[in-house]
Image: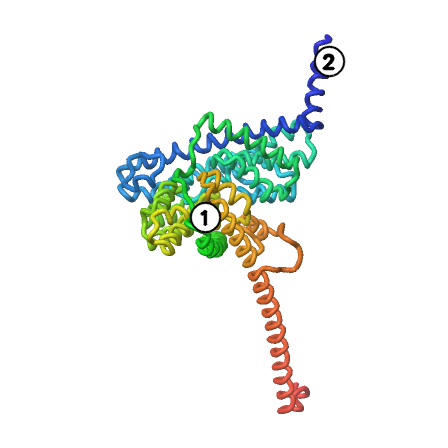
Amino acid sequence: MTTRPACARLRSALLGLLRDHRSGLFMLAIAVGLASGAGAVLFRLGIDAWTRFLTGAQDYTLSLGPSTGALSGLGRWFLVVAPVLSGIMIGPLMMRWGRAPTGHGVSGVLWSSRLSDGAMAPGPAAATVVSAALTIGGGGSVGPEGPIAELGASATSLFSRRLGLPRRAVRLLAAAGTAAGIAAAFNAPLAGAFFAMEVVLIDFTVDAFAFVVLACVSSTVLSHHLLGVSLSLSLPSLNLTGDTQLGWVALLGILGGLIGVGFSRARYLSADAATAGADRLRLPHWARPALGGLLVGGVLLVVPETYGESSAILGRALDGRYTALALAGLLLAKIIATAVTLAVGMPGGVFAPSLFIGGMLGACFGMIVAPDRPEAAAVFGVVGMGAVFSGAARAPITSVVLIIEMTEQYNLLIPLMLAVALSTVTGRFLTRSTIYTEELRRRGLSIEDPQAPTSVGARFQEHWRQSHRSSNREDDATSRGSASDRSSASNADNPDGADKH
């Protein structure tokens, strides 16, 4: 009889420790990190398995030939069938289990963080991860960070609901789960931590840092244990030839900011066009990814290098195996492919595509400004990766840390910092929203500076609206004046007109 009260007291004490004491919350951060790391591992295995099933290779862009997998009998036309087949499964899956009022990906995490405690529902997050694995494996040009960030944030709900954690603790744990997922997906624990603090929390306190670092370390250790340790990009030691090259780096940073903003605009303009077209045709939502897969397949048929994450193509570009014109074409093709993939309802992230686009931009730039240096494509390509991502997401610290962790090119730290800073300033100069916050702005939630618009884009839009309103008022006044003149003229011509009837 005494056993039950003792167990109850022990359980109550344990719950109190986890809920009310910082050390207990740190233990929960580790648990959330492990859960996120396990999800990231399963996500990666799912992407590789579906890619191998369809193409016969773990990374189709290594061979760029006909499929040797399940679609081998179709020749090159498997590039059209693969995304359609994925879309057939994605549509019903997301309609049945993927609906979430917060939205999906990093934008969904931001929405939940601003309007709630940051935790995401596990069911929709799992559906998004499965759908994203089908998307990437089926050739969709997206990355893994959006779904894995959502899954990491949802891991918090497994603990917070049972423990009744306070709102701030749940928000910190959700950000820690997001960071842990990104850390495991990109093998970049420090970048994952800074991403959570710079983009999700906008909080650089000691508590926030401790939470996200513990989660990132635990998830990365688990990922290393299950998948092994390898650099995302294996490159020889790189360096600039002198400080005079910093002028070219500065120019690349500005270009990276312009391309990053353009990439963000293309992503949302494509979504608007696809939604308008599907609504006009009255297509049900569950059928849109399947029919949209035809568009994705059409892009792949023309430029198969955009298949999935395109990791092998990025490596070849940094090795200088493409001409400057080919690199410019791949840059444009990746922007189109990513925008189309997301527009037709196939879920995924923009993190990896922005790195690819930046690598193409930097490699092309390096081959133009330093054609006599064989390593110029790699040097400027690495810098361009950080510049474009920072221009799109305006996360300069994350950009610098991520590129250094992915490449281990510590000699490029100073030029990378310069390019990222100028890219961030350029992006902020042109628009107030980022590739993540633009979706929130369209849904009626602004998390930007509430003061008057300061960016060129915002000022132009405000000026256009004011001019449009003034023009409308003048047109209305002119119309009323014309009507009054016509009435006066009519009365003058027929002064007895009012008595005719």
* Residue to which mark 2 is pinned: 5
Q: Which residue does the numbered mark 1 point to in the structure image?
A: 383
- Expressed as whole percent of the image width and height from the top left, the position of residue 38 reads 50, 28
- Tell me which corner region of the image, top left, top right, bottom left or bottom right, holds residue 456: bottom right
- Mark 1 or mark 2: which comes first in sequence? 2
**Residue 493's mark?**
none
| Horizontal side, residue 33 vs residue 117: left or right | left
Q: Are marks 1 and 2 in contact (CB under 8 Å)?
A: no
Establish if 188 lies above or below 5. Answer: below
Q: Nearer the viewer, residue 136 or 316?
A: 316
Task: Give neighbour class at mark 1: few <14, some 14-19, many 20+ (Cα, 10 Å).
Answer: many
Residue 269 visible in the picture: no
Residue 56, compared with residue 269, is above or below; it is above
> Mark 1 to mark 2: distance in Å?
62 Å
The answer to whether 162 is drawn above or below residue 355 in the figure is above
Question: Residue 86: where, in percent of width, then height?
Answer: 40, 39
The amino acid at mark 2 is Pro
Position of the N terminus, as image quadrant, is: top right
Q: Amino acid at mark 1?
A: Val
- Residue 361 appears left or right of 113: left
Q: From the viewer's perspective, tell me whether residue 71 is left or right of residue 166.
A: left
Q: Residue sitting at 32 percent across and 37 percent down?
A: 55
